Image (cartoon, rainbow, N blue to C red):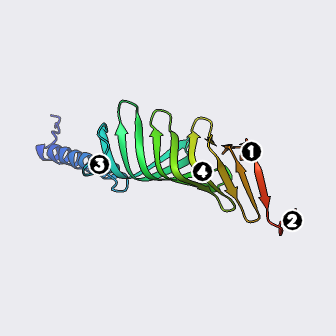
Amino acid sequence: MAATYKKPRKIKIILLATIIIALGTVIAIYIGFRSDSKVVEPVAGSDVSDATLSISKIHQTATRDGKKEWSLEASSGHYMDKTRQVILKDVKVTFFLKDKSEIILTADQGILKTDSSDIDVSGHVVLKNKEYKLLAENLSYVHSRRVLYSKSPVTISGAAAQLAAESLSFDLDAKRLTLEGGVATTIDEDFTL
C-alpha cells in the first residue's frame, strides 16, 4: 500500500503569512520612497487662487536616456491644471552639460510647463558657470532643443571682459552662444590673447 503525503495545514499558513509580510514590506518601501520630504510639502494658504495644487520646497529632475539634463528647486509652486504649468517662486535650475560641467540659473519667479518641460524665468535672472555670469530680466529654456534664450537685454561678465546685447541664444549641447542687437564689448586693459 503506497503512502500519500499531505501538506500539513500549518505549512500553508506559514507560506501565506510569509507572502503577505513580503508584500507589505515592498509596499511600505515604495510608499516611503515616494513620499520623500524634500520633494513636496503642502503650502498653507496658497496665494494663487486658480491653483489645483500648491506645494513648497519643490525639487524636480529631468532625465533623458538615463542622463540628468537639469535639476530644479523652488521655494514654492502652484500647479495650474488648465494650463498644465507650475508657477514657481525663488527658482534655481542646474543644467548638466555633456562635459560634466554645470550651469546654475537663479531667478525670483518662473513657470515650468509640465507637458514640454520648458521653463520661463524672470526677475533678477542670473546664469553662471565657473568663468562667466549672465544677468537678465527674463530667460527661457526650450527642453526639446536644450536651448536657453532671452529676447530682453543681457550682460555677460567674466574675469577680463564684459558683453552686452539686446538678445541671446545659448545651445547647451553645442556650447554655442549667439548675441544679437547692439552687441557691445568692454575689455579690461590687462586682457591678453
Q: Secondary structure at mark 1?
A: loop
Task: Mark 4 or mark 3: name the one nearer the start of the chain.
Answer: 3
C-alpha separation, residue under disc 1 versus residue under disc 3: 55 Å
Question: Quick one: label 1, few (<14), some, or many (20+) residues within 10 Å?
Answer: few
- Circle 2 is placed at which residue position? 192
C-alpha separation, residue under disc 1 versus residue under disc 2: 24 Å
Q: Position of residue 23 (x, y in %)?
A: 26, 45
Task: Mark 4 or mark 2: name the one nearer the start of the chain.
Answer: 4
Q: Quadrant of residue 128?
A: bottom right
C-alpha separation, residue under disc 4 versus residue under disc 2: 27 Å
- Circle 4 is placed at which residue position? 136
Q: Is residue 186 left or right of residue 4?
A: right
C-alpha separation, residue under disc 3 versus residue under disc 2: 58 Å
Q: Amino acid at mark 1?
A: Gly
C-alpha separation, residue under disc 4 versus residue under disc 1: 15 Å
Q: Secondary structure at mark 3?
A: helix
